[in-house]
Amino acid sequence: MSRLTAGTIGELRDGLRSGRVRAADLLEAALEGIADSEAEQPALNAFISVAGERLAEQVDAVDRALGAGEELGSLAGIPVAIKDNICTRELPTTCGSRILEGYVSPYEAAVARKLRAAGALILGKTNLDEFSMGSSTENSGFGPTRNPWDRMRVPGGSSGGSAAAVAAGLVPVALGSDTGGSIRQPASFCGVVGLKPTYGRVSRYGLVAFASSLDQIGPLTRTVEDAALMLSVIAGVDRFDSTSADLPVPDFGERLDAGVDGLAVGVPREYFPDDLDDGIASLCRSAVERLAGMGAEVREISLPHTEYAIPAYYLVAMAEASSNLARYDGVRYGLRVPSASSTMAVYREARGAGFGAEVKRRIMLGTYSLSAGYYDEYYGRGQRVRRLIARDFDNVFAQGIDAVFTPTAPTVAFRLGERVDDPVEMYLSDVFTVTANLARLPAISIPIGRIEGLPVGGQLLARHFDETTLLQVASTLERSIAADPLDREP
């Protein structure tokens, strides 16, 4: 693990501003750490592309400005990684797919522009399940990413490369995207913090779409404080994204030290089934007891439509994926198979050669659910169930609940290859996370302990656009666990 880049954003900023560390030192440490992680066997494979020497000029400018005492952006000199489904002009955007191998976007995502404006060093693009379709980062066209805690295990997905890069100390922070848990589940598996903001809080402009009504960009960090800082940088309305909310961006870190005294935390019985892993259930109970001990009112609640969340989510997500991925036809951009003898052959051969098995599966299922005679039976019904799930949360929050606590994932990181041939079992990895996307709520996963050396995450959800309370509760719990690390091994 690289000593410098394993720090928090706050620690690195203090080092830069005091002169103890130069931006050039951070860049060198990050690049060395990535090279080392790839030289080891088996390789971590967290990155698809790395900027490297292209950042030298920016680094020199940051160091000169700091030396002159100039006031710089909140991320000046900080190395940041970006999931490779977020468009950048200087590095390829592949979405982990061979169909986009080598593709360089002519424009940059809104979040990338905001990172640059804050002075961040965009170090590279991280690995992911192809087009974000997966829960293990085994579906990438560029090989699987491995978990830094145990390289025979998955890092989770689809933002597995971002989670692994932060957990391994290669960068202090990375961006991911979350369609059904793709930030929070890998955060749980890799022992880092993963934040999915409210749908509309962060612009999706430049995020290559998987399921447009579910996708949201968010940070993976080492601490809740860093997640709050990153959200402050990337949040806000964007004229290029009509779904972004025209709301003020608060100081998301202003109440991190406010505690939980007087807040009500709901614990839904549906998220603690009898077959939940005993170790995970125990760590979750311990986390809830900590919150109660610090003054929170803990209530058992019910979210009765939870059992329908997985089928509803996959109906909606696959239908939208089928529509969004229709553009990859071998004509406009992406892979082109030169031997094709007709227009139809171009479509068929480009998509056949360029897409992996999981993407093909989801396109076929999504296309079927949108076909004549089946639209209302499948996609339409999925949307109706989605509204019922959202109403469950509305009812709970209307009863005075400030935050909801659940497990993030039903298991610790599983072994590479263990679920590749069982897509249903793989889809169930998201059983506790998809509801936040369906209801468009903010949610966060933080580390709450370990089982046999493997990290476990606890999830918190809050009202729409109430990330401030969400981060307040998460930070309080994080500090409690940090102060009593002996409880982290069940």
Image: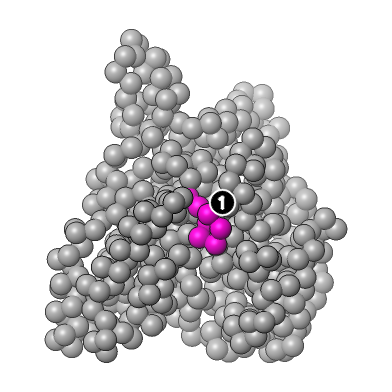
x and y, in percent, of residue 94 in the image? 36, 42
Residue found at the very far right of the displayed protein: 274
Q: Residue at x 69, y 66 (%)?
A: 451
Mark 1, residue position = 152
x and y, in percent, of residue 151 in the image? 53, 54
Q: Residue at x 35, y 80 (%)?
A: 12
Overall secondary structure of the magenta stretch?
A: loop
Q: Residue at x 15, y 73 (%)?
A: 61
Q: Which residues are magenta?
A: 145-152
Numbered disc 1: secondary structure = loop
Looking at the rendered structure, the kind of residue marked 1 is Met
Closer to the camera in the image, 134 or 3: 3
x and y, in percent, of residue 257 in the image? 55, 89
Closer to the camera in the image, 242 or 35: 35
Q: Quadrant of the C terminus?
A: bottom right
Q: Residue at x 44, y 51 (%)?
A: 41
Residue found at the very far front of the displayed protein: 41
